[in-house]
Amino acid sequence: MPRPIISPSVLASDFGNLTAECKRMMKHGAEWLHMDVMDGHFVPNLTMGAPILSCVHKGVPGIFMDCHMMVSEPERWVNDIADAGGALYCFHLEATSNPVSLINAIHDRNMKAGVAISPDTPSSAITDEIGAAADMLLVMTVYPGRGGQKFLERCVPKVAELRARFPDKDIEVDGGVGPKTVDACAEAGSNVIVAGTAIFGSDEPEKVIATLRSAVET
Ligand code: DX5
Ligand code: ZN
């Protein structure tokens, strides 16, 4: 299985101090920072776009921005996010009719490409061609749109199905993941753990990050 990666979701951070929040998480051992981009259309909320990501990229040396694009037209933002310093561009399979050409466009801009599936999308929607082309597959364990929701256990089998088909790919889980739910994700084969509330809501985020990592390592 690929290496464990912890990617705190900044959605649960203090947006007024976003660069400091990202630095704090990197100091606590986070490999990636999960940047939730919402367009008010694919999901009901609005969060941030390329201008903010660009400031974070400039303000946080060495940051790896794991950009989760909850947007209706993911083709539209590839160049802007690349220019802003995005390292990984993860789009929703539900939002595009041509995922493989989108993956190619992302790679052309030197970003890693991720493909996300919402709770009602089966793992079989990720065809062999899509899975082979992508760098990362994201299994949502809540309905995309907001933080702090309850983990949907019924999504976990999709992680195992994808791990069996794609042993070398990064497989990320996102939504309601924390020390109580991470073991199920890790056992199913996820190696990239996103957690917002569980990390930023803790007085000891470094301990939460260490706990999440050890769940994936074992
Ligand atoms: C939900 C977002 C998640 C969210 C996770 O739409 O994609 O990244 O911020 O937050 P928690 O860990 O609080 O469920
Ligand atoms: Zn997310």
Image (cartoon, rainbow, N blue to C red):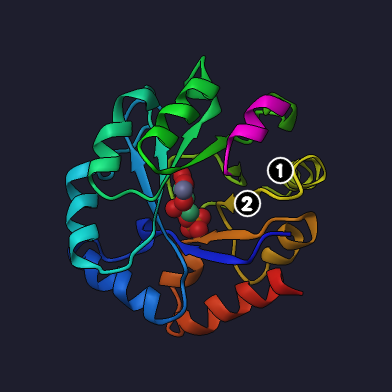
Give the quadrant of the C terminus.
Answer: bottom right
Q: Is mark 1 within 8 Å of ligand 1?
A: no
How many numbered callouts? 2
Q: Is residue 189 above or below residue 144?
A: below
Instruction: Indicate the quadrant where residue 133 lies.
Output: top right
Instruction: Indicate the quadrant where residue 14 lies.
Output: bottom left
Instruction: Indicate the quadrant where residue 51 lies.
Output: top left
**Which residue is at a point 72% across and 32% down the rendered structure image?**
123
Point out the frontmost of discs 2 and 1. 2
| 72 falls in the magenta region | no
Q: Is residue 16 above or below residue 154?
A: below
Q: Secondary structure at mark 1?
A: helix
**Which residue is at a point 56% across and 65% down the rendered structure image?**
5
Q: Amino acid at mark 1?
A: Cys
Chain part drawn in magenta: 127-135
**Which residue is at a point 37% across and 22% down the rendered structure image?**
73
Q: Secondary structure at mark 2?
A: strand
Q: Is residue 130 visible?
A: yes
Q: Indicate which disc residue 155 carries.
A: 1
Please report whichever mark, 2 or 1, sits nearer to the chain's N-terminal start: 1
Q: Which residue is mark 2?
A: 170
Please tell me which residue lies in front, 105 or 9: 105
**Residue 38: x, y in percent?**
34, 38
Q: Are marks 2 and 1 in contact (CB under 8 Å)?
A: no
Q: Indicate which disc residue 66 carries.
A: none
In terms of secondary structure, what is the magenta stretch mainly?
helix
Q: On the picture, is 156 further left or further right than 75? A: right
Give the quadrant of the N terminus.
Answer: bottom right
Q: Is residue 49 visible?
A: no
**Residue 48: x, y in percent?**
25, 45
Badge 2 density bin: few <14, some 14–19, many ≥20, Cα 10 Å: many
Q: Amino acid at mark 2?
A: Asp
